[in-house]
Amino acid sequence: MAMGDRAHLVLLGVAALLPSCGVGQQIRLDKIVLPEGFRIEVYSADVPEAREMVFSPNGILFVGSWSGKVFAIIDQDGDHKADRVAVVARGLDQPVGVDFHEGDLYISAVDRVVKLPSIENRIDDPPAPVVVNESFPDDQHHGWKFIRFGPDNRLYVPIGAPCNVCLREDPRYSTIMRMKPDGSELEIFAEGIRNTVGFDWHPTTGELWFTENGRDWMGDNRPPDELNRAAEPGLHFGFPYLHGYTVWDPVYGPIGKAKEIRFVRPEIAL
């Protein structure tokens, strides 16, 4: 990828996540430190509470949000500036996660995943969301979901812990799950994950790398957040028993079940 292309990716990625600004407000881009050769501009300031985003095959930028809406940002003349912003879905519960698959836009809400079929051709007349799977917990705490299709053609969906730190009987909590594009064969891929808000696959090994936001109220920067690597399904990454490399939870570890589990330590403690 050329440096110019990389620069534009950073520009779009950061600018789309900036909050909506009212009249007279200024976005302080000068406060953002960039690597040499990169620059940053505002792509659109009309996407309130933006979160995850994805480009469609035809270059439309779809953005999930905390505002209950999903947006389509359109650059009609290829100058890397938004010419139009359209709302393609509304009234969803924290529709944060978005990904594209075979012409359909997949969207995560708190308790379900839906899709907008053939949305690129229907920006001005979007279809009603089609439910893909609605069997996820409805807890608001860590309820919003970053989603992504993996190289195995499965949609990966995280289920955060419904708390700061806790242990629930429902095995879906504190996991990354995956399912077929039609919502079938939903299964747990990895567990012991408090809350992940971003993941991707290594282009060569196919291993899943993901972030994890650590628990609170144990002191400044303790325990750390994590960057983890899942080399295979079925691994346990520590929560709620073990945090970071060696920080045992004062309530849940190292006692009882924690002694029986083989935990995967993070690649990097942050």
Image (spheres, grey):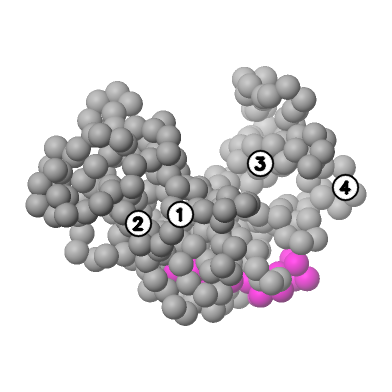
Q: Which comes sooner in the sequence, label 1 or label 4?
A: 4
Residue 13 is labelled as 3
240 or 12, which is in the foreground? 240
Mark 3 vs 2: CB contact within 8 A: no
221 or 51, which is in the foreground? 221
For badge 3, the amino acid type reads Gly
Circle 1 residue: 231
Whole-Å distance between the Cαs marked 3 and 2? Answer: 31 Å
Residue 119 is labelled as none
Mark 1 vs 2: CB contact within 8 A: yes
Image quarter hosting the C terminus: top left
Per the rendered image, the range of residues in magenta is 112-127
Residue 140 position, x and y percent, is: 35, 55
Whole-Å distance between the Cαs marked 4 and 3? Answer: 16 Å
- Secondary structure found at label 3: helix
Image quarter hosting the N terminus: top right
Q: Which comes sooner in the sequence, label 3 or label 2?
A: 3
User: Is 237 placed above or below 147 here?
Assistant: above
Q: Is residue 122 magenta?
A: yes
Question: Residue at 72% across / 36% down in the picture?
Answer: 11
Q: Is residue 100 left or right of residue 189?
A: right
Q: Which comes sooner in the sequence, label 4 or label 3?
A: 3
Residue 170 position, x and y percent, is: 24, 66
Circle 4 residue: 78
